[in-house]
Every structure is written in structure tokens, then in C-alpha cells.
């Protein structure tokens, strides 16, 4: 369907932007946390490696002190070296055994310091090759081989035997939080370790080279538990939630937009249907009214002929019903005329043919038509329309109908007193009261019909301009008094068609003043001002 919305709404755009920012923030936070973890791990590995290296080189230095005391005399050696070894052991309590061999491989010293249960105690005889001893050591021991040199001359080899625990003891104390494993690898063998490196999915590994005195290299490996794993998981969960939220927001907005589009399409359809129905009703009314007028005109015409005695004198008994037929037929024709006007206006079939109207002559002419009616009611009619008024460009037929309506109402609703018709110019410079003026920024001619009649309560001021609304309906029996409730609505519609407005000032018992506001051109105002001599400029003519 054509009304389906294709563009993303403001709400989704905003939400999307916020969520994208949030996602970017989450990504940055997550990678920062990850980087922090890695740094923590590498720092632990390098610090630990340096500590082990320091301990090994201290031990190596201690073993080197044996070199100057060595001679080829094994008895001397054993005695001299035993003393030195005792001093060394005091400084290195981790040592379990010390062996010294001559360059030939002959063991000249074997000092067992600690005998650990289950640990092999080597039966060392002078002359046994050191290399033959090593396979006999169990796996929990580490052997550090240190070449003994003195004045750059090789004096033999020292072998320091100690347990793996002892080698890692400096890094065991004060281990950083989260460390799961630390170990030393010689080739593919783990020669020392603390902790168990289980659940590899939850830990990070890092290996670093360890320099061992004597020229070999070991590897120190550290494993840390991923401490921020839960936090990152929570962050990603949050991101997922945000995406779900965005998606459902988009869906909601789209559904909402479709609903609004459907509703407005439905409203458009209804309004088009209503307009069509209204136009048809107006056309129907216009047609029916038009068709009614022909027979009604015939009735009114023939009744008039009857009353005029064209078909013979009417007897006193016949005269009264014929008068009533005449009154009712005239009222009906008036009603049909008004309905026809309303229907034409609603169907937009009423046209405006503007002409230059000289107001004073125009008002006098209309008033003369109603003169007999005014006199019949014993009312006074005064007209105060100046000759200096500018010409009004309007449709005279419509203006006549409005004025006749207002004057007829004034006669109808004024039991005694009089009626006045006034006209004046209202623009920015005029002294006249602009009460009710539709727009003070342009000039207007205000034509006023005032009476000293019944007046209208403020609450009814707007209502009487609605179709078929009546406040003081005339007596049913008197056809001249009987109203239709269409005069004012027609007058207001016609005035608006002419670009003007009708306003009302009235109070019950104090008469009414209806004002017809007609727009005038500034140029016409100027022409009128120039035409008028200063002496007669403000003179109003009163009949
Ligand atoms: P109607 O045919 O009844 O006169 P109108 O639309 O011309 O219909 O007027 C509507 C109502 O406004 C009238 O019924 C009457 O109550 C009130 N009205 C109109 N003009 C006057 C007036 N000059 N003085 C008092 N009441 C008036």
C-alpha cells in the first residue's frame, strides 16, 4: 500500500544514535579491560622471571667461590670444600645437595644437606662420573650445573641440587591476585611449578625466557584467570539488550506509523465521502427548491389575482381564507428561496460579480423598498450615509440581499421606536469606533443597521447566525412576522463571500446594531479623500 512509511522516524534515529554510542563505549571499555588483564599477566611473568634469575645467579656466584680452593688432591679438596660448602649452605637454605667434579668428571665432593623422604641418596664414591649420577635424581629435583673456573682455567663442575619448590619460593610469596599457575620449563619438561593450569578457556597464558647461569635457557610460564571475564560478559549482555531494545523500538515505531497512516487514510476517505454527500445534499436541495418555486410562483400569482377580484369579487367569508393562503404561500416561497440560497452557497454555486457601488445612493434605494413596511409598523427610519465615503467594489445583488434581511429583521423585531442605517469609513486614521472590526490593518466601510427593538441576549449572539436558530420567532399566525431562521446565516455567508463580516452589538430591551464590514481599497480611500473639500469632509447627510 502506498501509505506504508519508508523512512526511519525521529525516535528511532535518536535511540539508534544513543545505542550506537553505548555500544562503542562498551567495546572500548571491554578492550581496555582486556588490555589491563594482559598487562597484568606480562608484568607478573617478567617480574617473576627476574626474581628467579637473581636467585639462580646468586647461587651460581656462591658455587664459583669453590673454584679457587680446588686442587688435584682429593683429600685436601674434600676437607677444604666441605668448609666452603658449609658456609654456602648457611646462605642458601634451599640447597639439598652439592656435588663437585673435576674436569675429568671425577666427583671430588658430594655433600648431602637435606634428605627428603623418597629422595634418592646417591652413593657417591670418589671417581664416579657426575653425568652418571644425574639420571638417578628424582624429578622433583632441579640440578643447576655451574662450570667452575679460576683465572680463566676450568677447575671442574659444580652441581647444585634443590627442589623445584625452593626455586619458585621467591615468586610464590606475594603472588598477584588471579595467578593460577607459574612454572619453569626446560625444553618440553616442566621442572618446577606452582598451581594447576586447568580450564584453559578461562585463563590467559604468557611465557618468557629465563637465563640460567651456564648458558642454558629455561622458559617461565604464567597463567592468570581472566578476572574481568564476568564484567565483559555483563557488558556484552548489556549491548545485546540494547540491540534488542533498539530493534523493538524500531518495530514499535514502524507499527505506530503504519497505524497512523492507516487512520489518516481512513479519515481522508471519510472526509471525501462526507464532502461528496454534502455536495449531493446541497445539489438535491438546490434542485428541489428550484422545482418548488415554479408551482409556488403560480400559487402566489393566482391568489393575488383572486384577491384583486380578477375572478370576481370575494365574499367576506372567502376573503379571510384567501388572505391566509396568500400569506402562507408567500412565506413558503420566501423559505424556499432561502433554502435555495443556502444550498447554492454550500454547493459553491453562488458567484460574486463585483461592481463599483456608490453607497449612499445604494442604501437610499434599498430603504425606499422597505419604506411602506416601516410606515405600516409606525416606525421611524433615518439614513446617515455620507457622500464622502469611498466607492466600494462589491456584488450589489448580494449586498442588497444582506441589507434587506437586516432591515426586515429590524422592522420585525422592533415594536416601537425607529431604525437607523449608517455608513462610515474605518481605517487607521478614522475617529469612529472600530468595535468588531475584523482587521484594523486595512480600511473598511461599516454599514450599520440599528433598531430600538427587543435586543438579543449575549448568549444568543453567535447562535442566531446558525441555520434555523431563532430566539424570538414571530407569531405563527402573522406570516409577515413568521421567521425561518435562515436570514442571518445567509447574510453572514454572503458577507463573507464578499470578503467582509457581520458583527452584532445588542442587549435585551436596548435594541440591536448589526454591522456589515465591507473591505475597501486604499486607493479608493485616497481618491475619496482627494475628491472631498476640507469643509465637507466630515459632513454626514441625514434624511
Ligand atoms: P428569522 O427568519 O427568524 O428572523 P434570522 O436568521 O433572520 O431568522 O434571525 C434569527 C433570529 O435572530 C431571529 O429569530 C431573532 O430572534 C433574532 N433577531 C434577528 N434580528 C433581530 C433584531 N433586529 N432584533 C432582535 N432579534 C433579532
Image (cartoon, helix red, strand yellow):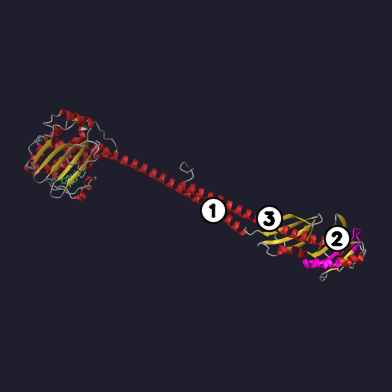
Which residue is label 2 attached to?
A: 68
Q: Which mark is residue 42?
A: 3
Residue denoted by label 1: 242
Sequence-first tag of 3 and 2: 3
Q: In 3D space, how far apart are the residues under numbered discs 1 and 2 (Cα atoms)?
A: 75 Å
Along the horizontal axis of the image, is 79 left or right of 291?
right
Instruction: Give the CA separation, mark 3 to mark 2.
Output: 41 Å
Q: Position of residue 95 (x, y in %)?
A: 80, 66
Whether label 1 touches label 2, CB < 8 Å: no
Dot 2: element: helix
Measured as percent of width and height from the top left, residue 223 is found at 70, 59
Quarter of the C terminus within the rendering: top left
Residue 22: in sight, yes or no?
yes
Q: Quadrant of residue 212?
A: bottom right
Question: Residue 164's x, y, as percent?
Answer: 78, 64
The answer to which quarter of the image holds residue 199 is: bottom right
The residues colored magenta run 81-107
Judging depth in this view, the residue of 392 and 454 nearest the camera is 392
Foreground mark, 3 or 1?
A: 3
In the rendered structure, the answer to whether residue 360 lies left or right of residue 249 reads: left
Q: How many marks?
A: 3
Which of marks 2 and 1 precedes in the sequence?
A: 2
Amino acid at each position: 500500500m502506498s501509505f506504508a512509511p519508508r523512512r526511519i522516524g525521529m525516535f528511532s534515529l535518536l535511540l539508534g544514535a544513543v545505542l550506537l554510542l553505548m555500544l562503542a563505549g562498551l567495546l572500548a571499555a571491554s578492550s581496555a579491560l582486556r588490555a589491563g588483564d594482559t598487562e597484568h599477566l606480562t608484568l607478573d611473568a617478567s617480574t617473576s622471571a627476574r626474581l628467579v634469575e637473581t636467585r639462580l645467579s646468586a647461587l651460581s656466584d656462591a658455587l664459583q667461590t669453590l673454584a679457587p680452593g680446588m686442587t688435584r688432591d682429593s683429600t685436601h679438596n674434600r676437607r677444604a670444600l666441605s668448609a666452603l660448602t658449609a658456609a654456602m649452605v648457611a646462605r642458601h637454605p634451599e640447597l639439598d645437595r652439592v656435588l663437585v667434579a673435576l674436569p675429568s668428571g671425577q666427583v671430588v665432593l658430594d655433600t648431602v644437606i637435606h634428605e627428603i623422604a623418597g629422595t634418592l641418596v646417591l652413593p657417591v664414591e670418589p671417581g664416579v662420573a657426575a653425568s652418571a649420577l644425574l639420571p638417578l635424581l628424582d624429578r622433583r629435583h632441579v640440578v643447576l650445573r655451574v662450570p667452575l673456573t679460576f683465572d680463566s682455567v676450568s677447575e671442574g663442575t659444580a652441581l647444585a641440587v634443590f627442589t623445584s619448590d625452593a626455586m619458585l619460593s621467591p615468586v610464590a610469596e606475594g603472588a598477584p591476585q588471579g595467578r593460577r599457575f607459574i612454572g619453569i620449563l626446560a625444553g618440553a619438561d616442566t621442572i618446577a611449578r606452582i598451581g594447576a593450569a586447568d580450564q584453559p578457556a578461562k585463563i590467559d597464558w604468557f611465557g618468557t625466557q629465563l637465563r640460567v647461569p651456564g648458558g642454558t635457557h629455561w622458559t617461565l610460564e604464567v597463567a592468570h584467570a581472566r578476572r574481568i571475564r564476568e564484567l565483559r560478559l555483563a557488558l556484552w549482555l548489556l549491548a545485546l539488550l540494547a540491540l534488542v531494545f533498539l530493534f523493538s523500538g524500531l518495530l514499535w515505531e514502524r507499527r505506530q506509523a503504519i497505524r497512523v497512516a492507516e487512520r489518516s487514510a481512513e479519515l481522508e476517505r471519510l472526509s471525501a465521502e462526507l464532502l461528496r454527500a454534502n455536495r449531493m445534499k446541497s445539489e438535491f436541495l438546490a434542485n428541489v427548491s428550484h422545482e418548488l418555486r415554479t408551482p409556488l410562483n403560480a400559487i402566489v400569482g393566482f391568489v393575488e389575482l383572486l384577491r384583486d377580484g380578477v375572478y370576481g369579487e370575494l365574499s367576506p367569508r372567502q376573503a379571510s381564507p384567501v388572505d391566509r393562503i396568500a400569506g402562507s404561500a408567500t412565506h413558503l416561497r420566501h423559505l424556499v428561496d432561502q433554502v435555495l440560497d443556502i444550498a447554492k452557497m454550500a454547493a459553491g454555486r453562488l458567484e460574486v460579480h463585483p461592481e463599483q457601488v456608490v453607497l449612499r445612493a445604494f442604501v437610499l434605494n434599498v430603504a425606499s423598498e422597505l419604506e411602506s413596511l416601516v410606515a405600516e409598523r409606525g416606525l421611524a427610519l433615518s439614513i446617515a450615509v455620507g457622500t464622502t465615503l469611498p466607492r466600494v467594489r462589491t456584488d450589489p445583488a448580494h449586498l442588497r440581499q444582506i441589507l434587506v434581511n437586516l432591515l426586515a429583521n429590524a422592522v420585525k423585531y422592533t415594536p416601537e421606536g425607529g431604525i437607523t442605517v449608517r455608513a462610515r469609513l474605518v481605517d487607521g486614521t478614522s475617529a469612529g469606533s472600530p468595535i468588531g472590526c475584523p482587521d484594523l490593518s486595512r480600511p473598511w466601510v461599516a454599514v450599520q443597521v440599528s433598531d430600538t427593538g427587543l435586543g438579543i441576549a449575549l448568549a444568543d449572539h453567535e447562535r442566531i447566525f446558525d441555520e434555523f436558530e431563532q430566539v424570538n420567532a414571530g407569531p405563527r399566525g402573522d406570516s409577515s412576522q413568521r421567521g425561518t431562521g435562515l436570514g442571518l446565516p445567509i447574510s453572514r455567508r454572503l458577507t463573507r463571500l464578499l470578503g467582509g463580516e457581520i458583527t452584532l452589538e445588542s442587549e435585551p430591551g436596548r435594541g440591536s446594531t448589526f454591522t456589515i464590514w465591507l473591505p475597501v481599497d486604499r486607493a479608493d480611500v485616497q481618491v475619496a479623500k482627494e475628491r472631498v473639500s476640507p469643509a465637507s469632509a466630515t459632513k454626514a447627510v441625514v434624511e
